[in-house]
Image (cartoon, coloured by chain):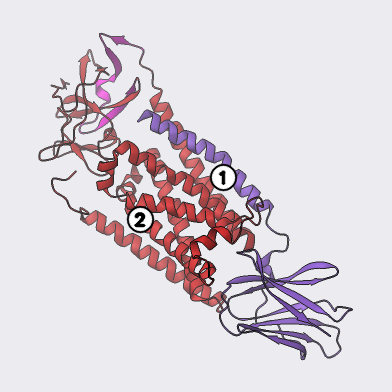
Amino acid sequence: MSAGYTAVGWNRQKKLYDWFIFGFCVAYLTSFVIVTAFINPDYTFETVLIRSASTLAVLLLHVILSIGPLARINKKFLPLLYNRRHLGVTMFCLAAVHGVFSIIQFHSLSNVNPVVSLFTSNTNIFSLSGFPFQSLGFFALIIFMLMAITSHDFWLHNLSPKVWKTLHMFVYLAYFLIVMHVMLGVIQFETHPVFVLLIAAGSLWLISLHLIAGRKEVKKDNQKFDLAREGFVNICKANEFEEGRAKIFCVDTERIAVYRHENKLYAIHNVCKHQGGPLGEGKILDGCITCPWHGYQYLPHNGQSPPPFTEKVSTYDVKLDEGNVWLNPKPFAEGTERPGSPL
Amino acid sequence: MKPLRKRHLQVWTLLAVLIPAGIISGYIVVPNQATDKLLQEDSSAALPVVINKIERNEYSVYLRNSADKTNWQLQWVNTKASTVPSSLIYKTGNAGKELIGRIEGQGSFYFPLKADSTDSYHFILYDIIHQQTIDTINFKP
């Protein structure tokens, strides 16, 4: 949400987040080099760089892919989501260091173009043990690059959130390519079981997290509201609402956030216009519903971002009857003012 | 948004099948002769007698044995940082191809050999990344 163009809206939290990422990466790379120098002093600088950058990139990829489902399972992880893109760009840079130096080391000293050499030097595509695993890493790197260069909100607005989200879902394909790049590459040469165990444990962790979070979401989406009258459905009791917070209801196909604000109930569409964040999982700050993902704000009574911002979401009618809350799932046009229902 | 959530779950359900299958398949085809266990660094002792020596621009290769000729050894010395970061050495002969060991870009490496009744020792240096032979080393009696 911005009135004028600023490349990155830096604030204290973003700076702290980035400094932490930077510090962690430096500490990891330094430790890797020291341990390698101690264990095997004959390693070349390029080899250490290729290996340290790749292991760190794989570690960060696991962290990045964990943040989404963790935030869905437990709200305490939401702060990690705030700058996940910075973590993603960092991961891409490390993967690029690994990729570029690998191409230089393995493919640059011949009369064939290094990228052509990458694809033509090994064509055993029907052999698992001799599979050209480097090409898997190359394609994953291309996906990471596309994600990194479109990570800015400029691209989110220009591509539309739907296209942007679809593009960024390719990270799952990239993850699969990386797992296979590791299994058919380094695991074939460095056969200590710890490497297989690490990649298997990482995959198991991610698969479990995503399936648990996914099933939780399906359960929410399949809520049934039997009592209906005059277009309204009975969603819950009025005393279940906490001031400044919301409850989310999935009626028909869309999720609706019902907020309690200054002793009135307001209902707005649950999906933030920025990146589709769950508005109902945020809270009211300075009189505005605030998205928990990136802090976009909307007024509870009309679903509009406060001026000068222009984002709008749909609003809904909500009413009270004998302590029961009734919601009409038919949306009003985005930004339509609704009076709210006094408690 | 509901279709998007559904798609996420579908993708991860698919990955829950594909990733373990990929890991298991990759693990099954790991070579029995693990190349990382074939590295033998300077800590190995050189046998005293140099039988033969071949020199290239980037490396020197020595065929060694013990004074009583009961033990044989191949010594590989990278005189410059190799342009191939990781390669395998195979001994070739009538009995086929036998994996001797792995060398990396720098350092010197020692590999024990079985005595050859023909007194001929032929080796190939194989690039495991590009899957191609880099050099052949022939020690003749």
Q: Is residue A235 magenta?
A: yes
- Name chain A's colour: red
SS for callout 1: helix
Spot occupied by residue A47 in the image (x, y as percentages of width and height) = 52, 71
Position of residue B130 in the picture relative to residue B64 (left or right)? left
| Residue in view at x 56 percent, y 45 percent | B19
Residues tagged by mark 1 and mark 2 found on one chain of the structure: no
| Residue in view at x 19 percent, y 38 percent | A297
Three-letter amino acid code at the position of disc 1:
Ile
Q: Which residue is mark 1?
A: B19
| Residue in view at x 51 percent, y 42 percent | A207
**Is residue A293 something that shows in the picture?**
no
Determine the image quadrant of residue B17. Answer: top right
Q: Quadrant of the C terminus of chain B?
A: bottom right
Range covered by the magenta-colored residues? A226-251
A7 and B19: which is toward the camera:
A7
Q: Which residue is mark 2?
A: A89
As measured in the structure, the alpha-carbon distance from the residue carrying label 1 to the one carrying label 2 is 24 Å
